[in-house]
Image (cartoon, coloured by chain):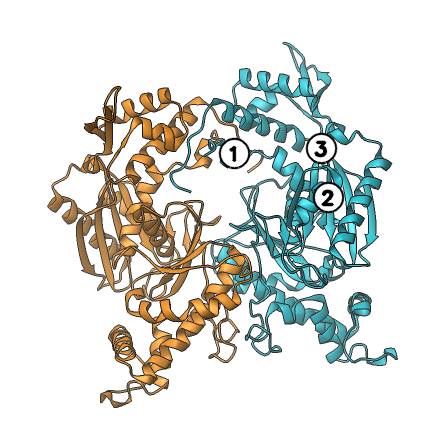
Chain colours: A orange, B cyan
Amino acid sequence: MGTRRGTNLPRMGDFNQSVILEGIRRSAAGLSRIELVDITGLSAQTVTNITRRLLDDGVIAEAGRTINGPGKPRVTLRLVAESRFSVGVHLDPALITVVLLNLAGQVVGRRVQPTADQDPQRVVATIAQTIDAVLDESGIDRGLVAGVGVAVPGPLDAEKGTVIDPPKLMGWHRVPLRSALAEATGLSVTIEKDTTAAAVGDLWTSRSKAGGSFVFIYLGTGIGSALVRDGEVVTGSSHNFGEIGHIMVDPDGPDCACGGRGCVEVMCTPRAIVEQAVAAGVFDGDGEASDGPHAEDMDSRLTRLCERASAGEAGAARVLRRSAGHFAVLISVLTNVLDVDRVVLGGPFWDRLSDVYLREIPGPLRLRNATRSVREIPVEGTVVGEDGGAVGAACVVLDAMLTPRASDLYLDD
Amino acid sequence: MGTRRGTNLPRMGDFNQSVILEGIRRSAAGLSRIELVDITGLSAQTVTNITRRLLDDGVIAEAGRTINGPGKPRVTLRLVAESRFSVGVHLDPALITVVLLNLAGQVVGRRVQPTADQDPQRVVATIAQTIDAVLDESGIDRGLVAGVGVAVPGPLDAEKGTVIDPPKLMGWHRVPLRSALAEATGLSVTIEKDTTAAAVGDLWTSRSKAGGSFVFIYLGTGIGSALVRDGEVVTGSSHNFGEIGHIMVDPDGPDCACGGRGCVEVMCTPRAIVEQAVAAGVFDGDGEASDGPHAEDMDSRLTRLCERASAGEAGAARVLRRSAGHFAVLISVLTNVLDVDRVVLGGPFWDRLSDVYLREIPGPLRLRNATRSVREIPVEGTVVGEDGGAVGAACVVLDAMLTPRASDLYLDD
């Protein structure tokens, strides 16, 4: 990039249209034109022109009139949720989740398939068939689908639309997922890191907390992060923002392949937490091989660990408290570098760990906060549920289409 | 922040004016109107209108005509460097540096004073007197000074304009530096973290490398960082972006007050490097007390260490190579999280360490780069010299005034 590009009237019009649509989208009850003038700062004439265009496109509709003292009654404008849709896919080593979202961000279709055979060609075929099945079931017009978002484990080559070397997906070296899936479905496809997608999902779904900045910590098979600033997700310059696997959290932890010791990858993943529980003897009486967790039982062992901790078993509780301490170190590194207002935790393993983590993380995080004399940094759980990756991926598509971005104002090179 | 605000014509005009001024500023030889149309994407009419306004304000001037085939000769427009000025102050525990910059970012005045007595009131008085002296010497009209930027050690309370607890400035608890200095000088004052200011200085001074994203590592009494994305510095939500003192870089390092071990603060500061050299016996034959470095000789000992390493002394070279390895770990944490295109190192201690660090950091950084299969991340030294903090602080003022920011397009709440 050289000098910043200028802007012009058509760009400004598109931007203001996004601003108005976002205002209406974020209001559950709808808004009148007068209210839109108030919240957007735009002139009444601009609001009238733009809302007329959105009404013509069928994206918003008039929804009743309010009489409020003398003068003309106010017409409420609301989003037509069923006017556009987007598909979200979460590609996980074990499961393929496909969801269909309407323009309001509501899930209106969903299917889950085991990834089973990991051969890339067959996985692409499975995803395409699952998308077809979800669209057929929903009975919607395919022409109303704005696109498909796919959440994948990073790193990825965003320019080429390829997944580079996802851990635990055998044979997935530089698979051109975007083009293959676009060809198989005939739809426009976007790929995004699972962590970034989950953060976009949280941003989109939490109406009340628009704006501000937060770091999102994703608890999946691996641990990743994402950043939202001023209501926009930060993807980084190569769409690989937030790789945190080799941040050291415990100098007494096990050696890591990177040459360090006690890194996030060997301390904070669900697998590592289960290993710490095994080492602490939590599963000793369970009458099964305790030679380290296998892929099949890692998930169920984590569940058992969390259940025992919440039932008051001291050993299990100690393992989770220690783990929360490691997360506090990780989170403090991120909040001190990124200078954000709050922390949001999510991802497939979050639900089970949330009780202990929400109780145990804030204390040590406060002590490690470089700006503690200026402000507290609250820690929260995500508002998106178990389908966070897939819902987030669908939101990436809606977000690209609907969220006003000042950078969209720049004229093209 | 709730819903994004819209934009309108006056905002657009201001933005495009900044874009044109930035284009002219970044071109050493000046630009014609046709060239401005080309690089900004704006219409010829818009460029003509805006350049007329800038000519009237005296910020740009016509500088000769080029005849280039048939048709009207092209008029070259260039910046009038002496049309506006800004003052930069670097408040360091040992030295107060004051510089005067013109609109082209050239240093046209400079004074350095020992901080000596650290009483806040007397320091403010010293800064104000030094600014007066620099302005008097320069003979410029005080009305042409756009403002004063002050680079201070973080953390700071940007809203209140206070410096919270700068290490090694005794008695500096929540000093309202901004208001006190504004009162003493009658000029508008901005305070910014020294690391952020230094990054803005690098961004402003390096004409050719506008745009892109880089992480800036500041080697001062403490080690800090800053981030530039798409040609704009990221200040974080409380202007405290980039606190990296407690990132662990060596699990076998000394204990840190934070509870960790081998943190940046106890491994990577100039003081820590000198301590490592003392422990390795580098100064053993120097006939002086080797009971750890004192404030007075830390600086000169670091110089001696670097001289001996470059003269080929094996022990000294080993200390610096090991230190470069620690920086490689730190930098990899930052580049993996932030997903930037390059790394820039600077700050008062950079010059002495640059030879060894530029040679030794890239190798281990490559191995730790999570996106190594997509791209390399080059490591460079800053283009700003020893006055980086003060020049950067002056650039913060020019930057706020002159750099087009899409976010400036939003209508006010």
Q: Nearer the viewer, residue B258 or A174?
A: B258
Viewport quadrant of the N terminus of chain B: top left
Is residue A377 found left or right of A139 in the rendered image? right
Q: Earlier in the sequence, mark 1 or mark 3?
A: 3
Circle 1 sits in a helix, a strand or a loop, which is it? helix
User: What is the three-letter code of the residue carrying label 2?
Assistant: Gly
**Residue A91: x %, y % from top left:** 28, 57
Number of residue marks: 3
Q: Which mark is residue B408?
A: 1
Which callout, 1 or 3, points to the residue nearer the camera?
A: 1
Label 2 to label 3: alpha-carbon separation: 13 Å
Q: Which residue is mark 3?
A: B103
**C-alpha separation, residue under disc 1 versus residue under disc 2:** 24 Å
Question: Residue at point 42% right, 34% down?
Answer: B5
Q: Residue at x 24, y 30 (%)?
A: A77
Which residue sits furthest right? B287
Mark seen at residue B137: none
Q: Residue A176, can we see it?
A: no
Q: Give percent across and percent down for residue A315.
A: 34, 85
